Image: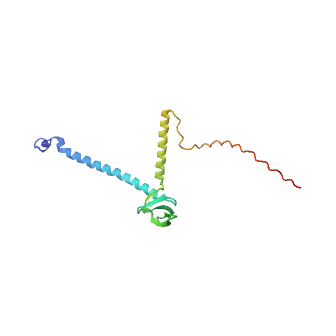
Amino acid sequence: MIWNLLAEGETSWFSKYGIWIVLGLIVVLFVVYFVFSGRKNKQRRQEYIEQIEAIQPGNKVKTTGGICGIVKEVCDDDTIVIETGTEQSGKSYVKVDKECIYQTDAKGPTQIAREEAEARRRAEKEAKEAAKRGEAPAATEPSEAPAEPEAPAEEPAPAEEPEEKQE
C-alpha cells in the first residue's frame, strides 16, 4: 500500500485527497471539543459565582490558602470575616476577599434547582420500579394533608384535695 502511494503514474482519488479529508476531520473534532469544553467551564464558573454570592454568616468555608472556618460576617466590599480555631485553642478572626474562597457549603440557586430535579427524577424512578413490582410507592415527601390527631392517652384522674375547713 505504501508502495502504491509513492509510485508514480495513475493514482486513486483517495490517495490524492484522503490526507486532506483526515486532517479536516481532525480540525473539526478539535473545534467541537473546545466549544463544548468551554461551555462546561463557563457553567462551572457561573455556579462558583452563585455559591460565592450565596455565602451568609454560619456557612463553613475553606480558602485557597487552606484556612477553614465559619463565616461570621459578610462585608459590603466583597470581603468576609472567618472565625477559626476552637474554644480551647482560642478563636481568631480572619478577613479575606470572597474570591479567595475555594470551597463552601453555601448553595446557589442553580445548585438547589439541580438537586431538586435530581430528587424528583430519583422519586419518579423509584415509583416506576415500585409499580413494576406491584408495590405501593414509598412516600419520600411528607404529604400536605393534615395528620389525624392522635387519641389522647388516658390520664389518671387528679386526686381530689381535701377541702380545708374554716372555723
Q: Position of residue 63 (x, y in %)?
A: 43, 61
Locate residue 14: give its quadrant.
Answer: top left
> Residue furthest toward the right?
167
Q: Position of residue 13 (x, y in %)?
A: 17, 41
In this view, 122 is above or below 35 = above
In this view, 134 is above or below 157 = above
Report the residue at 23% width, 46% height from top. Answer: 22
Camera-side residue: 122 or 62? Answer: 62
Q: Is 7 displayed left or right of 142 in the figure?
A: left
Camera-side residue: 138 or 8? Answer: 138
Q: Position of residue 21 (x, y in %)?
A: 23, 45
Q: Position of residue 135 (x, y in %)?
A: 52, 34
Q: Is 75 displayed left or right of 21 in the figure?
A: right
Report the residue at 12% width, 42% height from top. Answer: 3
Locate residue 100: give its quadrant.
Answer: bottom left
Camera-side residue: 1 or 63? Answer: 63
Report the residue at 50% width, 62% height from top. Answer: 71
Camera-side residue: 95 or 26? Answer: 95
> Residue furthest toward the top?
134
Q: Is 75 displayed left or right of 40 in the figure?
A: right
Report the residue at 49% width, 41% height from top. Answer: 123
Q: Quadrant of the C terminus?
A: bottom right
Looking at the rendered structure, the number of numbered marks drawn on it comes to 0
